[in-house]
Amino acid sequence: MLRLAATSLAALSLLTTAATARPVEGTLTYLARIALPAGAEVVIEARGLQDTPLAETRFQTGGKQVPLAFALTLPDGVNARLRAAVVLDGQPLWVSDAITVPAGDTPVALGEIVLNSFQPMGFASTLRCGDTRLRVGFFEDRAVLETETDRLILSQVPAASGAKFADPADEGTFYWSRGDTALVSLAGTQLPECVAVPPEPDQPYRARGTEPFWSLTIAGGLVELIPNIGMSPVRARLPRAGLNGADFVFDMYGAGMVLRLSETICRDLMTGTPYPQTVSVTWQEAELQGCGGESIDLLAGLEWQVEDIEGAGIIDSSRVTLEFDAASRRLAGQGGCNRYNAAFDLSGEGLSIGPAAATRMACAPALMEQEQRFFATLARISRFDIGPDGALLLYANDRQEPLLTARISG
């Protein structure tokens, strides 16, 4: 089994001891009838907000084929995103989608996780070298090494073992692949041993608040805070997070700024729109409070099962569902009789749903009447909220009580 760099082990230890650990287990498989090659390695990473490492396990397959069992432990009280990959010589072969493990304090059985064949989009590997993340890709006799701030073109040079690529203008900058690990030096500074981790596209993180109107963006490992409208931005590099209870804390002492993210639902003070995280920023003498993440993340990727339409419940054994797709901005599901889909629009001002298009299956009259009532109700929706018990509440602006109440299926 490969060992993590000492700095990574220390960081993971600090995080996992901040709360009681709970076990997580599952198996990895893929559908293609392709044998894993000798030397393949399994990598499973669990991360929290802003890619804060929560846990990791990696092991050689040793000739075993799928399904492959794994286990790791996560801290209680925080949500985690888990990704798995099978890599060979540091390059991914099979990769899972991100799996959300909700906060809790009981053991988690994930069951079977299906991996997908990895198709690199310009870069073959994502590496973690201690606290630094890099991407590296290859073409002909050159390598492209992308850091948080630079994109370097390296040429292949002779090496006693493995494959080594160096900057022709700076021999102190190189990438040296050595099987499952790699050595990287940047301008003469050698990084801790690099290991492959599951790739994941970068997505900017945004937070905002009122009174004053402030905004914060995290992208590419950099934080930009605009403390109030018209003020110049304050910029700092995003440090590794610490866990304070269930809060993620980023101390940017060089910029006089501390960022705290809590995975508790926050509501915009002006519109009531819910967001996934509560955010506080301490900057100089200011204490800025607001909301972080995107509202769509509270809705998408889940199947919501409707349990009430305008306070009248629903017919026993009928199935009415809602599934929001973030990419297409489409809503789909089961209307109780027919499948349906509709466009939706979600902004800081609210949620609106367009006319539903449905299949034409005939059902019992009571089911047909309920379905038409459901479709008509969808067209009246103007905002949403998440209740204290996790229920999805869909409202019209002219009503205090929800038009629709739904819960996550299962």
Image: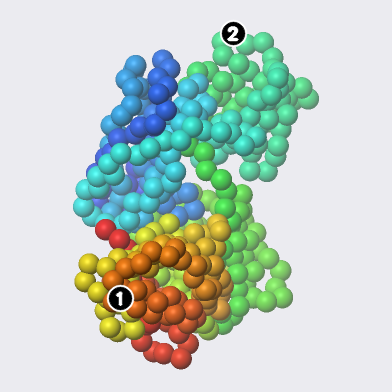
The residue nearer to you, when weighing 226 against 395, is: 395
Q: Residues within 10 Å of mark 2 (few under 14, many from 20)?
A: few
Residue occupying image coordinates x 50% and y 18%? 179
Amino acid type for the residue under numbered disc 1:
Pro
Residue 167 location in percent, x, y? 73, 25
Residue occupying image coordinates x 48% and y 28%? 93
Q: How far separated are the C-alphas under marks 2 and 1?
A: 78 Å
Q: Residues within 10 Å of mark 1 (few under 14, many from 20)?
A: few
Amino acid type for the residue under numbered disc 2:
Ala
Choose mark 2 or mark 1, whichever is in front. Answer: 1
- Residue at image mark 1: 365
Residue 99 location in percent, x, y? 39, 47
Residue occupying image coordinates x 55% and y 39%? 133
Tell me which label, 2 or 1, sits earlier in the chain. 2
Residue 48 location in percent, x, y? 42, 52
**Image position of 193 with respect to 381: above or below:** above
Q: Any mark on residue 406, and which? A: none
Asked which colour scheme the image uses, the reply is rainbow
- Residue at image mark 2: 160
| Residue 190 location, quadrant | top right
| Residue 174 location, quadrant | top right
